[in-house]
Image (cartoon, rainbow, N blue to C red):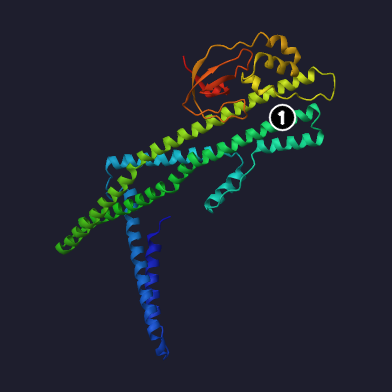
Amino acid sequence: MFRPDRIQRCVSSAATSSQLVRRIPLQGNTAALPACSALHGIMDFNVKKLASDAGVFFTRAVQFTEEKLGQAEKTELDPHLENLITRADSTKNWTEKILKQTEVLLQPNPSARIEEFIYDKLDKKLPSRTTNAELLGQYMLEAASDLGAGTPYGSTLIIVGEYQKRLGGAEREFLQTSASTFLTPLRNFLEGDCRTISKERRLLENRRLDLDICKARLKKAKQAEAKAAAEHELRVAQTEFDRQAEVTRLLLEGISSTHLNHLRCLQDFAEAQATYYAQCHHYMQDLQRELSRCANAVGGSNSTTAVCPKPVSSAFLSGQTSSGEAVSSLSSQNPSALAIQQTQLPVTGTRKAKVLYDYDAHDSSELSLLADELITVYTVPGMDPDWLIGERGNEKGKVPVTYLELLS
């Protein structure tokens, strides 16, 4: 609770302490006279400054209390400035909530978030952390090595483990991209611009209180000399208030550019999410195809030691072999599909497609893509519906459908 009497006692005690120091006898030690004089001067300055600051604080506190009680007039801010302040408060509030929830989304572990916060405050690089998917993949590979890579279970553990590691790598890349393009700008705004705006708003409030104090003094002044002094103080206070209001207004108007910057950051975050989920979708489709081949190989063999077959020849999937070579490749790995494949070798018509996202080929059978480029695509009947054959000049390879926008 605010206690004006306590502040008044503190000012009086400080002044009394200064007087006591002046009265301390030197007891004949004249050599210490210059040092004592300097000490007295420093203490006089500190005490006077303390008393002055306490006096200003006291008068502002009284003015603020009387305003709250309706016993004093209050200078209202310009409506435009009030709207800017409201907008800045809303921006700060929602930015804090979005930042906090995004951190929870990207890192659900509270202990890991605290560790990242400490490293950030110490301005040190956070050690690379293995993602859960990568750790799971590593455990699967080690289990396959221990249980027997030549068994159906062991070979399947190897396949799933490799894809888990790929998923983990994509997740780590997504986390790094999101932190640099989205979290860092939001955090910089809260720790930089927001703090500066808050500081200038506090100064503006102090200047307003000083202005209203001067107005109250002018009203209470009776004598001409007191009125002249009060009018001079009022002019000075009004000038300082107007100057601080202009500085605060310029800072608050910068919130518009902050919104534009956050808009770009939000778009980058959404793009990073789209890329990450598209990669995960692609990996899981590949994994399903691998597991399907494993199931067919194990189901068609009476041997308990049957293992998953090697993937179908990448040259066959990319349409780069002759009909005879393709049939031979498929026949050697899955004879039951030979009769079906002999009727599915013709190629369908070509179409143009626009690439939506960058895509890095995972092997020689695939074609790397760059966002916004146009390529020619077609399909070989019997291919996986999630893939097409893409051509760009003399380059040719499999491309995922989810990365393309087919043009009419």
Instruction: Tell me residue 80's x, y (percent).
Output: 28, 40
Most foreground residue, 110 or 240: 110
Q: Amino acid at mark 1?
A: Ile
- Quarter of the picture containing the N terminus is bottom left
**In this figure, which residue is indicated by the disc labeled 1?**
159
Instruction: Tell me residue 356's x, y (percent).
Output: 49, 25
Most foreground residue, 223 or 297: 297
How many circles with numbers are drawn on the protein? 1
Judge left or right: residue 284 versus residue 231.
right
Residue 328 visible: yes
Residue 38, compared with residue 366, is above or below; it is below
| Residue at the image point whose x is 56% and y is 11% from the top | 348
Question: In which quadrant of the rendered view does residue 256 lie?
Answer: top left
Instruction: Tell me residue 19's x, y (percent).
Output: 37, 77
Residue 345, compared with residue 138, is above or below; it is above
Most foreground residue, 249 or 351: 351
Residue that sits furthest to the right in the current view: 303
Judge left or right: residue 127 versus residue 261.
right
Judge left or right: residue 84 versus residue 96.
left
Instruction: Tell me residue 283's x, y (percent).
Output: 63, 28
Judge left or right: residue 89 versus residue 397.
left
| Residue at the image point whose x is 36% and y is 41% from the top | 255
Residue that sits furthest to the bottom in the current view: 28
Question: In which quadrant of the rendered view does residue 225 lie?
Answer: bottom left
